[in-house]
Amino acid sequence: MDFKPVQLSEIDEFHALANDLIDGEIASATAIGRVQEWTRRSLHMRRWNGRPDGFVASIPLSDSGVTALLQGEFGFSNARREWVCGLEERASALLSWGLAGRTPHAQAAALRALLVGWRGFYGDVRVYARARTTEGKALMRRLNFEVCAYPDGESPLYCSTGFPRKLGDMLLKRTVLGKWEGSS
């Protein structure tokens, strides 16, 4: 799918892409880089024709990270090392911080990359996400997420009810990106 982990030398480029594609304020490149340095697996970016065109950002959370998230304390800007999981640590949950693409093709690739990571590495933990846009809220419904909290008092925090088998199978087997895996 051409998504590769973001190297620390690429943080500014990742930040610029996220800033272009996400409405509203995002954390600084320094804050985002700090979390990537701790986890080594939170940020993935895709290049198309030599130019960054899509990203997936998912943060593996510890038990204390889940508590901080539900209490409205967690964010890239104020993340603490004990709230996130490094490569050798087992995640208690996954926060899908964002995914986006410059084109419909890149958007489909980002969604597909999120689903592959969710199913392949985090299939046994709850996934949390926020949705800022109408499209994001529709995606939450399609993925069978439900509102589980309002940590800031007004914006909903969604959580997974399990991997969305029907949609996941459809997207993972055959999409505009081509065949990914054989039928099981």
Image (cartoon, rainbow, N blue to C red):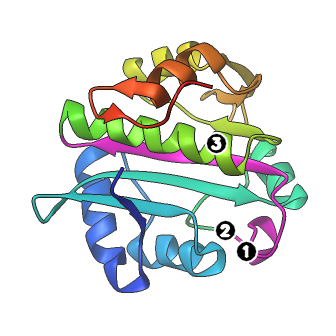
Q: What element carries label 3?
A: helix
Instruction: State the CA–CA distance, disc 3 to disc 2.
Output: 22 Å
Magenta stretch in the rendered image: 79-102
Residue named by callout 2:
79
Instruction: State the CA–CA distance, disc 1 to disc 2.
Output: 13 Å
Residue 146 x, y percent position in the rendering: 70, 18
> Is residue 158 positioned above or below 13 on the image?
above
- Horizontal arrangement in the rendering, residue 56 relative to residue 53 (left or right): right
Q: What element carries label 1?
A: loop
Instruction: State the CA–CA distance, disc 3 to disc 1.
Output: 17 Å
Which residue is depicted at the point 55% across and 24% down? 183
Residue named by callout 3:
118
Residue named by callout 1:
86
Q: Foreground residue, 101 or 172?
A: 172
The amino acid type, in three-letter code, at marker 1 is Gly
The amino acid type, in three-letter code, at marker 3 is Trp
Q: Foreground residue, 170 or 144?
A: 170
Which residue is depicted at the point 63% across and 57% down? 59
Question: Pointer 3 and pointer 2: residues touching (CB < 8 Å)?
Answer: no
Ranked by sequence position, the earlier of labels 3 and 1 is: 1
Ranked by sequence position, the earlier of labels 3 and 2 is: 2
The amino acid type, in three-letter code, at marker 2 is Ala
Which residue is depicted at the point 63% across and 25% down? 184
Which residue is depicted at the point 64% across and 73% down? 39
> Quadrant of residue 70 in the image?
top right
